[in-house]
Image (cartoon, rainbow, N blue to C red):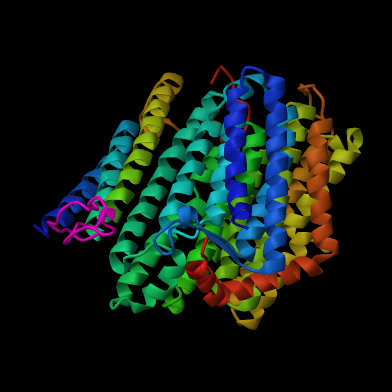
Amino acid sequence: VDALLPLMIGVLVACGVYLMLGRHLLGYVFGLVLISNAANLVIFSAGRLTKYAPAFVPEGALAPAGAVANALPQALILTAIVIGFGLLAFTLVLVLRAYGVLGTLEVDAIRPDEDDAGPREESR
Amino acid sequence: VSWLLVAPIAVPFATAIATFALRGAPRLERAASIAGAAALFAASIALLAQVMAGGILAAQMGDWPAPFGITLVADRLSAAMVAITGITGLAVAVYALAELDREREARGFHPLYHCLLAGVCGAFLTGDLFNLYVWFEVMLISSFGLLVLGGTRAEIEGGVKYVTLNILATLAFLTAVGLLYGLTGTLNMADLHLKVPQVEDQALVTTVAVLFMIAFGMKAAVFPLFFWLPASYHTPAVTVSAIFSALLTKVGVYALIRVFTLIFTGDVAFTHELLLVIAGLTMVTGVLGAACQSEIRRILSFHIVSQIGYMVMGLALFTPLALVGAVFYLIHHIIVKANLFLVGGLVKRLRGATELKSVGDLWRSHPGVALLFLVPALSLAGFPPLSGFWAKLVLVRAGIEQEAWTIVAVALVVGLFTVFSMTKIWTEAFWKPQPEGARPEGGGTALMVLPIVALAALTLLIGLAPQPFFEYAERSARELLDPAPYVRTVLEASR
């Protein structure tokens, strides 16, 4: 089981990188989703994988009874997931908008045609 | 005392909420925005004064003792960065009143702007790596919003590149944080300073260090990770470009300095040598990129990249004098760079364009503007007696003391090329006759000139009386190289 999670992280990153190297912007964004999940799993496994109980403190006590799982990485991941969700939602909307404005999501086609730094003419 | 540490974060957040609540009443919204920026300025100066008088300040949020809770801490570097954020934040907020169009303002410029300032201050003040990640995100999401505020084709295009590449940097940062936590079991930076040397496998530490270098390096726009910057910084409103160029990359540099003086100092021969190579290449690529551009804001964007190289050089040499140079350079650069972008906006207002081929003759029609351009431009290039001269002098001196001849040569040659770029803007925009087809945008410029004059005065002040700034940077460098007081203050701060 210990080897499973690192392997999965590896596969996620590999798939993410593959998608990001493609020519489509949407693929790039999906690649980001995969890698962000991989990053969350890295934090999770960095907190050591244990089969202990959740870290609840019984009423009236100051410390949990018995061994508990490490709650800190869970808190970190929760934060990271929420933030990542917000960022990705924004990115998807931006990509949608880019599709509307630019008319394409092919990465090769999204390049500044203002290299001569002139104001963009309608005739181009 | 702890309120001094909270205020630079709480004030901009409160302002953001206030401006958002007042979005139906533009006049009140603007007043709230300026009041908030002024309050942040006051708070940041108060913090600076306290740190100068009493040394390092630390506070534990919610009374959770370090290293378990979230620590806010201000040493001299943090305090100076917050103060400079307060200064540029106020200057750019005033400038925004005159420069920004109604549409962008109505779409929520002010709330986003103040959220950005809160994120920047938070990143400077936090003493915890995961918390730093959160502040980076606050900063990032507000900058996304600001960047695409106008919704024009250019903004969307630049926005896509900026957003996608920055999220990648964020993920690298997050992964590095996770791995470091796995190695040490802590994320408090002061605690990490004690725990990292105890890790058995130091090779793993160096690996994680390089991952941090990639993450922060991308934020700081160093070679070869800077491509998002020149692709996006010239697209939004000038106000937005100015605040981005002043603060965002510098947060990356700050994070690099913090992490590579406090946490990863175990393998200086490898990590800092790598940083030195990066610094040299960053300077060269940035300045060469600028040389072949012909739009004011694009030239300036590439110069951000090249100047970042100088700051990283200071960190990479890792001697007291070099760190003095890095800190001095950071302070000087934020002011100068913001000011250059502000002048660029003034040119746009007066001539309706920022492409060099369609502006000209500003020297004759607006000699005042020309002078205002010269101060930051010459300072950027490092002419005495302006602030950039002292910054470069200290760095070059530090390099010579280390007998790092290559980087010294690169730094000097890049300075020369910087002069070339600045003279290019000067001869094109200010000297040559005005080409046909100028369409001045019209509108008052008084509120645009005011912040430019203030920042130029500050540049002159640093240039003419560098001694107090130099002494401050010197003490700051001493704190960075000997983190024991920092660590003690953080771990012992009761509340």
Is residue A48 part of the magenta span, yes or no? yes
Instruction: Check the picture and name the quadrant holding the N terminus of chain B.
Output: bottom right
Give the x, y percent position of residue B420. Answer: 72, 53
- In the rendered structure, the answer to whether residue B192 lies left or right of residue B239 reads left
Viewer-side residue, B10 vs B295: B10
Examine the structure image and report whether residue B38 is included in the region drawn in magenta: no
Q: Total marks drawn?
A: 0
Residue B471: x and y in percent read: 74, 72
Q: Which residues are magenta?
A: A47-71
Q: Is residue B64 above or below residue B184?
A: above
Q: Is residue B477 above or below residue B105?
A: below
Q: Residue furthest left?
A: A1
Magenta portion: prevailing SS class:
loop
Q: Is residue B415 rendered to the left or right of residue B232?
A: right
Residue B392 is at least partly visible in this image: no
The residue sitting at the front extreme is A60
Task: Tell me the residue at 63%/51% (across/down).
Answer: B303
Task: Tell me what residue is drawn at x 74 percent, y 61 percent.
Answer: B388
Res B149 quadrant in image: top right
- B245 versus B78 height, above or below: above
Q: Residue at x 22, y 57 (%)?
A: A64
Residue B308 visible in the current orientation:
yes
In terms of depth relative to the viewer, which is nearer, B473 or B219? B473
Tell whether B143 sits left or right of A55: right
Whole-percent x, y for residue B88 in the image = 70, 46
Q: Nearer the viewer, residue B325 or B16?
A: B16
